Image (cartoon, rainbow, N blue to C red):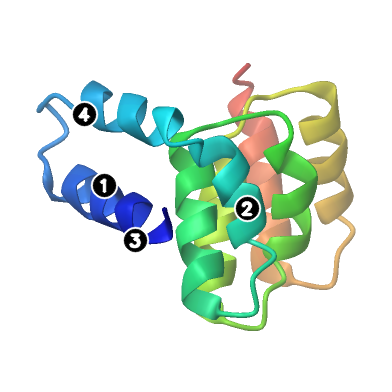
Amino acid sequence: MTARLTELIARYDSLDPDEQRAELIAEMRGLGGVEAARALVADENPEARRVGARVMELLADPGHTPLLARLVHDPEPQVAGAARRALHHQLRTPEWHGIVASMLEGSDPELRVCAAEWLAEGRL
């Protein structure tokens, strides 16, 4: 399944933003992408964690938020970056707001800036 999700992400990312991406998202969901992403972000392999975070970005789900909150601190920069992008695109639930607000107090200055910007967006 990881290989198929990786292939679908590559296809998705190769399309122009105006092109139809909905069928790729639907296929990712149909493959159990939400659940698969949760397993991938816990994998020892950094590439699997990166793919998991990217799937979480594309298939937003409230259950992703606490997992991404840990993954934004991944020692692999590509994984941490993917997790930050994914966290930014999650549903703005009270849990999301609490987690992101707590990042304002963290030791990572770049993440503090991101958190402040995300909270200032005022999106739902």
Mark closer to the chain start, 4 or 1: 1
Is 31 placed left or right of 95 in the picture? Answer: left
Q: Nearer the viewer, mark 3 or mark 1?
A: 3
Taking 36 as reference, is 93 above or below it?
A: above
Q: Nearer the viewer, mark 3 or mark 2?
A: 3
Residue 58 visible, this angle: yes
Q: Nearer the viewer, mark 2 or mark 4?
A: 4
Q: Residues within 10 Å of mark 1 (few under 14, many from 20)?
A: some
**Which residue is at 17% across, 48% downward?**
11
Q: Secondary structure at mark 2?
A: helix
Q: Position of residue 77 (x, y in %)?
A: 54, 79
Disc 1 and disc 2: Cα gap in Å?
28 Å
The residue pinned by badge 2 equals 114
Q: Residues within 10 Å of mark 4 (few under 14, many from 20)?
A: some
The mark found on residue 3 in the picture is: 3
Closer to the camera in the image, 46 or 39: 39
Is 113 placed left or right of 52 in the picture? Answer: right
Mark closer to the chain start, 3 or 1: 3
The residue pinned by badge 1 equals 8
The residue pinned by badge 4 equals 21
The mark found on residue 77 in the picture is: none
Do the residues bearing badges 3 and 2 touch, measured as CB atoms within 8 Å? no
